[in-house]
């Protein structure tokens, strides 16, 4: 696993949901259910379109493929925990 793939996976799987939760909770003051939906949606794995764009523009195809795989595996473990942890369910 390269550092680029790990960085992409960590950014999408940890940083993005955390930022969505913080902005939703403290800036937008969302209710519990909309906040939970936004946070879980942000925590979903990297989509296949990212890989398609990388392939089309021949830019870091291997790293993006690894990041998609890693974020899917991370999501399989993190999303059930996140669904239990978030209020408003």
Image (cartoon, grey):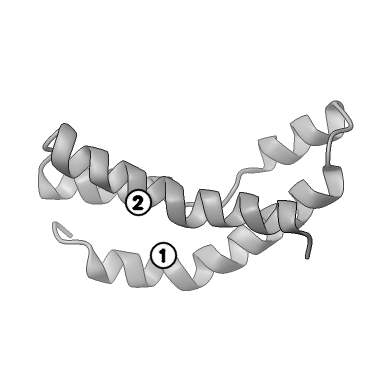
Q: Earlier in the sequence, mark 1 or mark 2?
A: 2
Left or right of residue 5: residue 80? left
Give the answer, above or below, for where 50 lies relative to 67: above
Number of marks drawn: 2
Residue at image position (68%, 53%) is 68
Left or right of residue 51: residue 10? left
Residue at image position (22%, 39%) is 24
Mark 1 vs mark 2: give the one in front.
2
Q: Toward the viewer: 1 or 45?
A: 1
Give the answer, above or below, for where 82 lies relative to 11: below
Residue 77, image x and y in percent?
A: 48, 73
The residue that label 1 is drawn on is: 79
Q: CA distance from mark 1 to mark 2?
A: 13 Å
Residue at image position (41%, 65%) is 79
The residue that label 2 is drawn on is: 18
Residue 81, image x and y in percent?
A: 35, 72
């Amino acid at each position: 696993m390269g550092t680029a793939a790990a960085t992409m996976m960590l950014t999408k799987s940890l940083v993005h949901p955390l930022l969505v939760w913080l902005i939703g909770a403290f800036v937008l003051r969302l209710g519990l259910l909309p906040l939970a939906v936004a946070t879980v949606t942000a925590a979903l794995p990297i989509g296949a379109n990212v890989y398609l764009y990388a392939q089309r523009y021949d830019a870091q195809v291997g790293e993006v493929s690894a990041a998609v795989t890693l974020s899917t595996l991370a999501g399989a473990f993190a999303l059930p925990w996140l669904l239990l942890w978030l209020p408003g369910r």
